[in-house]
Image: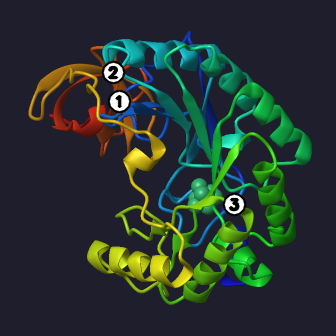
Amino acid sequence: MKSLQILKEEPKLQGLIKITRESQIPLLGLIHIGVLDRGSSLLQVRASTACNMKCTFCSTAANSYDMHPYNYEVELNYLLEWIKEVMRLKDNQVNQINIDSVGEPTAYSNILELLKEVRKIPEIKIITMQSNGTLLTKDKIKALEEAGLNRINLSVHSLISDQSKELFGKENYNLEKIKETCKLINNSKIELNLTPVYLLGINDAQIDLLIEFAKELNCRISIQKYEIYKYSRKDKRVKEQNWFKFYRRLGELEKKHNYKLKLGPTDFKIERSKRVPLVFQRGDITTAEIIMPGWMKNEMIAKSNNRAITIVDCNYKIGDKIKVKILETRDSIYIAKKI
Ligand code: SF4
C-alpha cells in the first residue's frame, strides 16, 4: 500500500514537548494545543497532538514528521487552570467541552482524569470527545462512562476492512473491532455519533452503508465534508465538492434513507456566546519572547500579554525577545511575523 510505504520511509522519531505549569506557556492562542474558543458555548480542549493513525486525507497531517517535527502534551492541572481561565474570560458562557485534538484524544495519558475534573465544573453540562475508536476497549469505555463523558464522535469512513486500513494508513486498523466498539458505546450511557468523512469518488457507496449502520444502532451520524487546507494531507483521488453540492447530497441521502443527516449547532445544544476578548488586533506590534518550537517546521511559539503567538518563518532561539507584527487574530489564534 503506497501510504504505508511512505510511512516507512519517514523518520521514526518525533520530538515530544511536554508543557508544564512551570513553563508558563500560555494555553490560549494556538491552533494545535490548549484551549480554543470560537465564540460559542462549546470550548475545544486539546491536551495532546499525538495520533496512532495516518489517514490519507488527514486535515492536520498528523504523523507527517516532515511537516510537524514535534508532538505536544499538556500537564493535566495546568490545562485545567487554563480551561477555567478561558471560561472566566467568556463570563462563564460555556455549557460544554469537546476534547478534540489535531491527533487522537484518547492517546492523551491523562484522558480519564481530564474528564473527571472537567465533570466537576458546574457550568459544564455536556462533555464530548472525538476519537478514531482504535484505542477504546470495553474497560476503557466503561471508565469513560464513569468519568462522565456524554458523547463520542467516532470517525469511521468505510465498512470494508481493506479500504478502512488504507484510508487510516495503518495495516493494524481492525474494522471488526471498531464495529464492536460502536456497539459497546451505544449500549453505554455515552452517546455515539458516527462522523465519517465523505470522500467523493472513494467512499460514496460506503456512506450509504454507514447511514444504514447508524440506523441499525439508532445513533446519530454527522457526515463530514472533505476539506482541503494548505497544510493538510491530500488524497488526490478525492473529487472536490462545494458546500452547496455537499448539502444537496445530504438532502438526497436523508430522503433515501429516511434518516436525519443535516445536523447543526442547535442539534448539539451549542449556542453563540461571548468571545474571549482579543489582546491584540491585526497589525499590532509587540515584543514577544520565544518559548518553544512551533507545530509547523520553520515556526516558533512566542508569548506576549499572556497569550501564545505562532511566529512564522522564524529561526530565533528560546529565550530570545523579538519585535513582531500580528498578522492574524481569528478565534484568539495569534499568528505574527518578526519585524
Ligand atoms: S485519526 Fe484523525 S488525527 Fe489521526 S491521522 Fe486520522 S484524521 Fe488525522
Of the numbered discs 3 and 1, the one sitting upstream in the chain is 1
Question: Which residue is label 2 attached to?
Answer: 307
Q: Quadrant of ligand 1?
A: bottom right
Decide: marks 3, 2 in contact (CB < 8 A)?
A: no
How far apart marks 1 and 2 lie (CA) works out to: 6 Å
Q: Quadrant of the C terminus?
A: top left
How far apart marks 3 and 2 lie (CA) works out to: 31 Å
Q: Residue 286's quadrant in the figure?
A: top left
Q: Going by the image, does 278 lie left or right of 306?
A: left
Q: Is mark 2 within 8 Å of ligand 1?
A: no
Out of 121 and 155, give the one closest to the viewer.
Answer: 121
Of the numbered discs 1 and 2, the one sitting upstream in the chain is 1
Circle 2 SS class: strand
262 over 264 or under it: above or below: below
Of the numbered discs 3 and 2, the one sitting upstream in the chain is 3
Circle 3 SS class: loop
Q: Amino acid at mark 1?
A: Gly
Q: Going by the image, does 117 lie left or right of 182?
A: left
Out of 304 and 252, give the one closest to the viewer.
Answer: 252
Q: Amino acid at mark 3?
A: Met
**Image point (75%, 82%), residue name:** 160
Question: Which residue is label 1 attached to?
Answer: 29
Q: Amino acid at mark 2?
A: Arg
Residue 308 shows in the view: yes
Q: Is mark 3 within 8 Å of ligand 1?
A: yes
Q: Going by the image, does 85 lie left or right of 105?
A: left
Question: Which residue is label 3 attached to?
Answer: 53
171 over 202 or under it: above or below: above
Colour mapping used in the image: rainbow
x, y percent for residue 273: 29, 29
**Image point (77%, 58%), residue name:** 182
